[in-house]
Image (cartoon, rainbow, N blue to C red):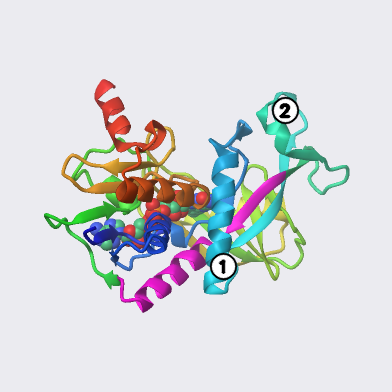
Amino acid sequence: MNRITIVGMGLAGSCLAWELWRRQVPFRIVDDGIPGSSHVAAGLVNPVTGKNCAVSWRYREFVGVAERFYRDIETRLDCRLWFPLEVTRLIAERDEKMSSKLLQGEAAAWVIGERESHPWPGHKAYLLKGAARVDTAAFVRKSREFFAGLGNVTTARHQAVAGETTVWCEGAAGLLRANPLPWQHRCAKGEILTVHAPAWRQERMVIGRGWLVPLGDDFYKVGATYDWDMLDANPTSPGRAFLESIARDIGGADFRIVAHEAGIRPIIRKSQPVIGPLANGSVVFNGLGSKGALCAPLVANRLADWLIDGREIEADLSTQAYFADLTKL
Ligand SMILES: Cc1cc2nc3c(=O)[nH]c(=O)nc-3n(C[C@H](O)[C@H](O)[C@H](O)COP(=O)(O)OP(=O)(O)OC[C@H]3O[C@@H](n4cnc5c(N)ncnc54)[C@H](O)[C@@H]3O)c2cc1C
């Protein structure tokens, strides 16, 4: 098989690189070295998401593959990437509809119970299982070191080259460029804080108006903003003020900000990733949205199945179905 070129080394490109490496397929990675959203993501993998307490699309299937994938890389690279978590989900006491959605809907399978005593007045606090945090920044950094050590990584901005099999894993940068294809993207900028807060003493992820997630040693990530208009990766003062208010509401007044970062989530269609061929003969893997840590391992596996073994891509993930749908709009 001809050598494959992977363009971009965030979660998408890194997961695909591991799939090709395992199958002993020749490949190289070209990445511009600009930190993408995988470097700022909190890496949350969470069964019940969003304001509606909906269960994440194909969660059981995705989370099983993701845990095996990251655990395997942990062993191979001698590091920790996968951190299982319980979640405390806060719901305003007056919002009975939301509580019954959580307790009686599909989400109920992930609910352990209601916390009796907790420090959030005016709220019910439900304990949920089945979540995790992936250290996405460490995963992409260590994957890069590993593949650079094998001589597979070039730091450059890649342009299309005729005749080679190129897989574009460019994240938001690829969706914002209307070339080679006009994606109907809904990319969203996100800002996030890393704080040091010994007084908080939270062992669980806490989700309310925003969320906080413990990183260990009294450090936490606090997130996140969503902005569909200003699509750049610059942290802003209003973003910082908003995140500080979340930190105060959920964690408490006593914290010190150690980092304030921003990135752009690559979002398309129903916030589901797509893989497969483009009309110009190249291949794409994009649209990981807010769930790259969860989705990238399984989707990379399906892409490698198609690239190497010719296995059909399921319609849910396929570029062909995505662009066919767009023409109907
Ligand atoms: C604030 C914030 C919080 C988030 N929190 C979570 C979370 O808790 N859980 C979760 O799962 N997801 C989260 N996400 C989303 C997550 O970051 C994305 O789903 C995922 O990182 C996207 O990975 P990617 O590989 O597609 O893109 P990227 O990580 O952006 O990687 C693409 C890389 O390719 C490079 N590149 C682009 N074009 C070229 C080219 N032509 N040549 C060479 N290199 C190129 C880019 O510079 C970039 O480094 C969050 C995102 C943000 C912004």
Q: Picture coordinates of residue 167 (x, y %)?
A: 27, 53
Examine the structure image and report whether residue 209 is included in the region drawn in magenta: no
Q: Marks 1 and 2, Cα distance to the nearest angstrom?
A: 41 Å
Amino acid found under the numbered disc labelled 1: Glu
Q: Residue at x 26, y 59 (%)?
A: 4
Residue at the disc numbered 2: 95
- Front residue of 281/264: it is 281
Q: Quadrant of the C terminus?
A: top left
Image quarter where ligand 1 lies? bottom left
| Above or below, comparing residue 260 to residue 272 in the picture | below
Q: Residue at x 16, y 43 (%)?
A: 280
Q: Quadrant of the N terminus?
A: bottom left
Q: Which stretch appears magenta?
A: 129-152
In the rendered image, the residue lying farthest to the right is 116
- Front residue of 316/51: it is 316
Compared across the picture, whether 41 is left or right of 231 comes to: right
Tags 1 and 2 in contact by the CB under 8 Å rule? no
Q: Residue at x 26, y 47 (%)?
A: 283
Amino acid found under the numbered disc labelled 2: Asp
Q: Is residue 233 visible?
A: no
